[in-house]
Image (cartoon, rainbow, N blue to C red):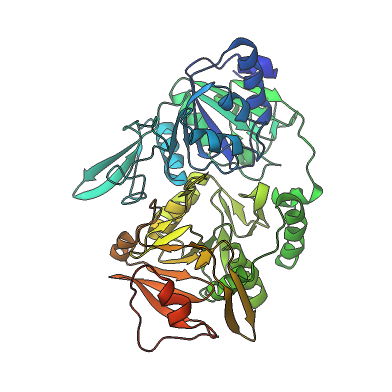
Amino acid sequence: MHKIMTIEEAVNLIHDGDIICLNSFVGIENPVALHEGIYAKYKSTGSPKNLTLVSSAGFGIWEEDRAAEGYIRDGAVSKLICGHFGAMPSTKKLLMEDRFEAYNLPLGCISHAIRSQAAGLPGALSKVGLDIFVDPRVKGPGVNSLSTDKNLVKLVNLDGEEFLYYQLPKLNVALIKGTVADKKGNIAFDDQFMSGDALSVCQAVKANHGTVIVQVDRLVATPSRPRNTIIPGSLVDAIVVVEREDYPVSFRALTGGFEIPYSEWKGWKSMIDDISTVHVKVNPAFKVIGKRAAKELKEDDLVNIGIGIPEQVADYARKSGILEKITLTVESGGIGGLPVSGKVFGAMIGAASVYDMANQFDLYDNGTLDICFMGGFEVDQFGNVNSHQMPGNFSGIGGFANITAKTPNVVFCLTFNTKGLNVDRSNNTVTILENGTVPKFVPNVSAISFNGQRAIKNGQRVLYVTERCIFELGENGLKLVEVYPGVDPQKDILDLLPFPVEYPAKISKRK
């Protein structure tokens, strides 16, 4: 039976050594007050300590001194298992300093492993992750030298096929953020941007005889409609009421509380971007890439567009008119609207549906997407891509591995080099005014997020769209298949590559 509790009372239900599962997504829907209650108790008593935190998609709010950052930094956490660390600026630094065990698994694989625990199963089988960094034969999921747990990801053979087996420690505390609780303890998510895997997290914790703690904005007397209840009260142990912090009126467009027609998407996105993103002048090279990559879209495509340079694809899809004829998706569960970025990444404007995150990754893992557009730090001669780890920068793999594992058409959007790249585009001609000092195309990537040879075996079409040319993945590695007007193939491309590529005598020059 659930009880209404203060933050202090709820935090007292958490004990040393507990394994806590968080339901937030990167920087949204985080039970911040509960995190800060844990930190307050830890500072005053030294407990709870030796905690393990598990999250499919991360649980920061982009601030170094809020949410879980404080008690992680001060030593309450001994192990962290996460798909993405981007919204946790302090934690990202600490995990590279060997302050605690840290593991990075594909977001969707964590989501499915949580759902497996909800079903009373020890783990989840997946082909996602084979031959990339998380595969024990390549590196494994450990982020630092302390991270030697061999049980999280295992290579298994079933009926002659290889799989990775993802097995999380038994979750025994759930921390959830909802909107309202009714008198029976039923939790609805009406004003949330998504529900993530809230139900699976609670079911998994109850299967392990654990404790479910939910932070809500308010209590209501009248129960929500049964279909709107995400978590039934029978699964809830403690409810903490914390009045929601004010957020901009424009963010209400992300809750699905009112219809937003396609004609209004651009206006709402501009208002949201003004608040949630850091505004920098878009490099002209990014626009060249986005415009060309968008030409790969076809009517009725089911699509995922990544953050960073790929976001330009949506902009040019709108300008060309095809955006209205395709269906966009976002990892948190949204489908049929326009994803937003920055601090509210994971939310959608005008979504047709927002369902459980594990179901979204079913769709990605089974190859139902038609095309995806992803970024990347490095590409090598074999078509491998590193998108999750660079010196001094570790954000994690997120949903990247799941999205690219079986999607028939994978389009990587990245500049040819970076740090000082200066490009001019006028009259459909590209001029490389100055090359960057850091190459993006390298002999061997420093970490494998995407394996080119596995993509060839899968029959996927893979393109690498840059501001000057396009490479396609072939049996023997990269092929130069398109050079933009104004670009000198020898001087601007081939002379700068550290490896040979197939270069047809006649090559397409698209305007």
Name the foreground residue: 289 vs 454: 289
Can I make out residue 198 in this image? no
Residue 87, by quadrant, is: top right
Q: Residue furthest left?
A: 160
**Residue at image point 46% right, 19% down:** 209
Q: In the picture provided, is 142 more to the left or to the right than 340?
A: left
* The N terminus - image quarter: top right
Identify the image quadrant of residue 123: top left
Quadrant placement of the C terminus? bottom right
**Residue 13 versus residue 79 in the image, above or below:** above
Please provide percent x and percent y for residue 207. Answer: 44, 25
Residue 501 % position (x, y): 34, 74
Residue visible at 79% across and 46% down? 248
Residue at the far bottom in the pictured view: 506
**Quarter-of-image position of residue 196:** top right
Is 273 above or below relative to 245?
Answer: below
Q: Tell me if I can see residue 328 in this picture.
A: yes
